Structure formats: structure tokens, C-alpha cells
Image (cartoon, rainbow, N blue to C red):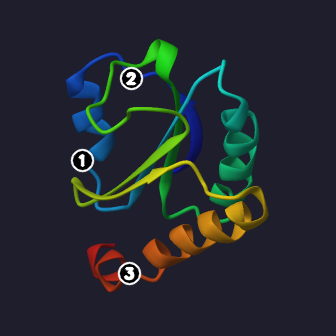
Amino acid sequence: MGIATATITNAEEYEKVLSTSHPVFLLFVSAHCPACADAGPLFELIAAKYPDIVSLVLDCANTPKHPHVTGTPTLLVYFMGELMEILKGFGPIEDQEKTVEELFNRYTQCPLLHSAT
């Protein structure tokens, strides 16, 4: 587990990534997105503190279109293969660190996570 910059090329690869009992955070970014330039490093910094969460950064140029990703940055949170949350952007710059930290914290505290491991 941990952080990875990944390339997913088809639906089967999405299924493989999601077939875990751990929360999965998929951050979709684009090289041409100014907000992604800040969101990606912030996400990676915070994700490093949460080794029980699978965290992937996916470049939209190299990843098939996902129906819930209509812009970047978009964070999709899955647990037990189910989509739990969609975060389109991280909000105002002054709140971004808190927003992302709270999201990771919420899934670390999830009682199902501790019973699944």
C-alpha cells in the first residue's frame, strides 16, 4: 500500500485496484491543470502518513475516462469496492490541507477497516 503514480489502461485494471479491503483513494490530475500542480503534491504529502490507504495519482492523459471524473483534480474514494465519496477539487487554497487530512483521517478511523484487516 501507500502512494503510487499509476497508469490504468482498462476497466479490469480499475477492478484490480479496487479489489482490496483497504480504502482506495484515486486522484485524477492533468498536466495542463493549474490546480493539479498544487493538489498532487499536497495529496502525496498527506497520503504518505496513511499507509493503510491505497493512494494513486492518475494522469487523465494516460488513464481511460472515468464516468465520475468531469474535471481535474478529482479525488474518488472507494471502500470495499464501493464508491464512497467524490471530491472535485480540494476547495479554497487556505482549507485544502485540512480538507484532505480530514478525508484521510475519516477512512483511517473507519471501524470496518479495522475489522477487515
Residue 75 in the image, given as x and y percentages of width and height: 47, 48
Q: Residue at x 62, y 57 (%)?
A: 91
Residue indicated by mark 3: 110
> How many circles with numbers are drawn on the protein?
3
Compare marks 3 and 1 and give the one earlier in the sequence.
1
Mark 1: which secondary structure? loop
**Horizontal placement of 56 versus 23: left or right?**
right
Q: Residue at x 30, y 30 (%)?
A: 66
Q: Residue at x 61, y 68 (%)?
A: 99
Mark 3: which secondary structure? loop
Mark toward the viewer: 1 or 2: 2
Residue 29 in the image, given as x and y percentages of width and height: 56, 31
Compare marks 1 and 2 and give the one earlier in the sequence.
2
Name the residue type under label 3. Cys
Between marks 1 and 2, how big is the CA–CA gap? 14 Å
Position of residue 28 relative to residue 84, above or below, is above
Residue indicated by mark 1: 19
